[in-house]
Amino acid sequence: MAKYNSIAVIYGSDSSEWEVSCRSGEFVASRIDDTVYSVFEIFARFGKWQLVAYRKKDSMRVIFPEEARPEINKNDFSVNVYGEKIQFDYAYIMQHGFPGENGLVQGYLEMLGIPFSSCSSFVSAVVFDKYSCKTYLKDSHLVKMAEDAFVRQGDDVEAFSREAVEKLGLPVFVKPTSGGSSFGITKVKTSSELPEAVNYAFSETPTVIVEKAVNGREFTCAAYSDGNSVEALPVIEIVSENEYFDYDAKYNGHSDEICPARISAEVTELIQDTTKRIYGRLGCKGVVRIDYILSEEGLYFIEVNTIPGMTSASLVPKMVRAAGLDITAFLSTIIENS
């Protein structure tokens, strides 16, 4: 017997990732088991939440024209459809970036007492900020961390850049502390390029992290709770045609995503076990993907994705297929155990 009846899939966002979020949300909505749940698709951007489409149990998908989309009542998280009030009793959050990945939507749902698919508002907020997440994990000794430097908009960028090069050397990666899909990220090889790269990252967020570049192979792995234990999905190796796994490599086919990764059983176990341990250490919920660099010195942490991409070509669905799992059954597992 399912716990929930009306599943609201929330997609779109206020960030640069909003279009990717829509593709992820539409894919998830299309794969949720409609023999068990009624599925309602909510497009949410800049405070305007509207019902885009819905699919009641064992029924066809109904799509609203843009000018006639019903508004979501945020007072109680409901919608009126042709005179019928629909009360959502579960939210599957597919908003990449803010406000769905930084804890704001989670906080709203927590105040209303509505269960949802992702990490709590606190965990989401900590993990969404790359610098905060690294600081939270550093003392755990679960994984190696690249040396870094932190700067806030308004600081002296020229002075910071000189100090960062002296501390970290070159090359370095310059990243907005929050966000995803590689927006605002630059690999810097000369000291003269660093101030411009920092200012470019400020176009995404008011805080920036500069990390020492680690040479090695890039891997990613996802973990989730099946209700009894935390399970890890197969490891993927990412081989980018570009200098690193940037937006072009991610979304325009300029990378090979090898799943399962061609690595030894020992390395596979190391990555999967580390992923499960970080998942537990942070107190994650739902499905979470963690990215790494494996160098000669060991396994280095890159970042945690609390709402990973879920298009048909995304990494987590590839892992699910490689594990021999059915995506619809997998989504039911997430819904019933988060």
Image (cartoon, rainbow, N blue to C red):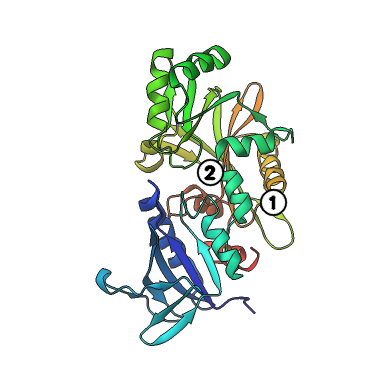
The kind of residue on which mark 1 rests is Gly
Q: State the separation of the CA atoms marked 1 and 2.
A: 27 Å
Q: Residue at x 37, y 23 (%)?
A: 196
Sequence order check, earlier mark of 1 and 2: 2
Question: Would residue 266 appear left or right of 118 to someone viewing this image?
Answer: right
Q: Which residue is mark 2?
A: 259
- The number of numbered badges drawn on the structure is 2
Which quarter of the rendered picture does the N terminus lie within? bottom right
Asked if one can make out residue 171 in the rendered structure from this viewpoint, the answer is: no
Question: Would residue 174 appear left or right of 331 to someone viewing this image?
Answer: left
Of the pair 23 and 320, the residue shown nearer to us? 23
Q: Residue at x 37, y 73 (%)?
A: 71
The kind of residue on which mark 2 rests is Cys
In the depicted structure, whether residue 291 falls above or below residue 68: above
Residue 227 in which image quadrant:
bottom right
Crowding near pointer 1: few (<14 within 10 Å), some, many (20+)? few
Question: Would residue 264 appear left or right of 151 to someone viewing this image?
Answer: right
x, y percent for residue 241: 40, 30
Crowding near pointer 2: few (<14 within 10 Å), some, many (20+)? some
Q: Which residue is mark 1?
A: 283
As helix, strand or loop, the secondary structure at mark 1 comes to: loop
Which quarter of the rendered picture does the C terminus lie within? bottom right
In the depicted structure, whether residue 49 falls above or below residue 21: below
In the depicted structure, whether residue 271 falls above or below residue 241: below
Q: Nearer the viewer, mark 1 or mark 2?
A: 1
x, y percent for residue 292: 58, 34
Of the pair 304 and 100, the residue shown nearer to us? 100
x, y percent for residue 99: 47, 54
What's the mark number on residue 334?
Answer: none
In the depicted structure, whether residue 51 falls above or below residue 130: below
Residue 72 in which image quadrant:
bottom left
Q: Residue at x 71, y 42 (%)?
A: 273
